[in-house]
Image (cartoon, grey):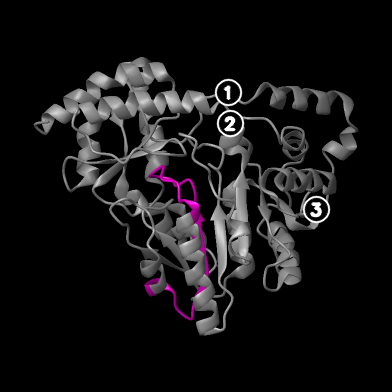
Amino acid sequence: MIAKSMVGYVKGSSVIRAMFEEGKRLAKIYGAENVYDFSLGNPSVEPPKQVREAMIDILQNENQNLVHGYMSNAGYEDVRDTIAKSLNKKFGTSFAEKNILMTVGAAGGLNVIFKTLLDPEDEVITFSPFFGEYRNYVANYGGKLVVVPPSEDFIPRPEMLAAAVTKKTKALIINNPNNPTGVVYSEEVIKSLMDVLRDKQKEFGTSIYLIADEPYRELAYDGIEVPYLTKYYDNTIVGYSYSKSLSLPGERIGYLVMPDELDDFENIVQAASVANRILGFVNAPSLMQRTVARCVDAEVDVAAYNANRELLYGNLIDMGYECIKPQGAFYMFVKAFEEDDKAFCAKAKEFNLLLVPGSTFGGPGYVRIAYCVDPEMIKRSLPAFKKLSECYGK
C-alpha cells in the first residue's frame, strides 16, 4: 500500500503531463501531423550549438575523474564563480561563488529553498494564476500556499498582497515572466509589491523572503525588460533553470542565488547545501554544470518564439478568442468559451487540440496554450481552432 500522504497526489497527478501522454496516444491513431499538442512547455527551438560543442569538448579533453566525480553539495566552485560573474555583468550585482548553489533545475531549487525555510504551518503566498506544482512543493514541507486572486489583467495589486500577508507568512513567490499568462511584471509593479513586504516585515517583526522563480527570464518580447529582483528587496532568493534559456528541459540543471543581504544569510546558505543532499539530489548533474558554465552567454532564439506568438495570437483573436497578449515566456492564457474550462478542453480534444485547463493553474475559465512548438503545427492547427470557435457560435 502506498503512503496515505501520496493518495491525494496520485489522484491529482499533473493534468499537463496527462495531456502530453494523451497526445502521444492520439498521434498513434490519427498520425502525429494531425494532432495539435499545446500542452507541455517543451521547447521546440534547438539548444544553441555552443551547448553540444561544450559537451563534446568536456568529454574529450577534460579530466574525466573531475567531470564525473564527487563535488561539494553546492556544486563546482569554478562553475558557481563563472555564473556569479555573468550575473554581475548582466545586472550590476555583486555576487560571488558563495552566493550560488547549483540545483537539479528550478523545481529542485524551489524544493531546496522550501526545505531550508519552512516550518509546518508557515505560509507561502503566490499570485493566481500560478504554476500548479507550487502547491505540492510547499506542502512537501508542511507549509500552506496562500493564493492571491487574479486581477483582470493578471498584474498583482499591492493592496491584495497586503491583505494576504500574516504573521505566518514566510515567503512570496513571484514567477516573472509568468507561467501560464505570459505577463511580465514591470519595475513599477515590483517596487509596489516590495514596499508591502518591507512594511509587513516591520509590522510583524518577521523575515519574509521573496522567491523569484525565473526560468523564462530571457523569453521577453517587444523590448520588454524583466526586472532583476535582488535589486529591489534584500530578502530575495532567485531560482533559475536553463530548461528554457538553453532549451535543456530534460537535463534538469539550474541554480539558486542567495545574496549576502538575506536575513540569516550564513545559516540559509549552509542549510540549503544540506537540503540539496538530504532531499536526494546531493548535487546538480556534473556534466551539465560544466556545460552551462561554458554557455552562460549563449542565447536562445527568442525570435522563433515571437514569430509563433504573433502567428497564433493574431489568428485566435480574429476567430473570436479573448487573450491578453503575452509579453514573455511561451504561453497564452486564453478565455474559454464556457465557464467549465475542463469541458472546453474536452470539446477541443474532439478536434485533436490538446489544451490545458486554466483551473490547473488556479485560473478557472481559461486554457493555457504552449506555443513553443513547430510553427508548421500552429498553421495546421488553425482550422481546428476555427471549428472549435464555431461550435460556440463565434
In this rendering, which labeled residue sits more in front, label 3 or label 1?
3
Q: Where is residue 348? Give x, y as percent.
A: 23, 32
For marks 1 and 2, the one nearer the N-term is 1
Q: Where is residue 46? Give x, y as percent.
A: 58, 23
Q: CA distance from mark 3 to mark 1?
A: 29 Å
Q: Residue at x 57, y 75 (%)?
A: 119
Figure check: 392 above or below 115: above
Q: CA distance from mark 1 to mark 2?
A: 6 Å
Q: Which residues are magenta?
A: 163-187
Q: Nearer the viewer, residue 385 or 348?
A: 385
Q: Residue at x 23, y 38 (%)?
A: 322
Q: Which mark is residue 97?
A: 3
Does the stretch in magenta take in 180?
yes
Q: Residue at x 32, y 57 (%)?
A: 150
Can residue 93 be seen in this snapshot? yes
Query: What main secondary structure does the magenta stretch of the protein show?
Result: loop
For marks 3 and 1, the one nearer the N-term is 1
| Label 1 with label 2: CB-CB less than 8 Å | yes
In the figure, residue 289 lies in which quadrant?
top right
Q: Which mark is residue 112?
A: none
Residue bearing mark 1: 46
Instruction: Name the quadrant of the C terminus.
Output: top left
Q: Residue at x 64, y 24 (%)?
A: 48
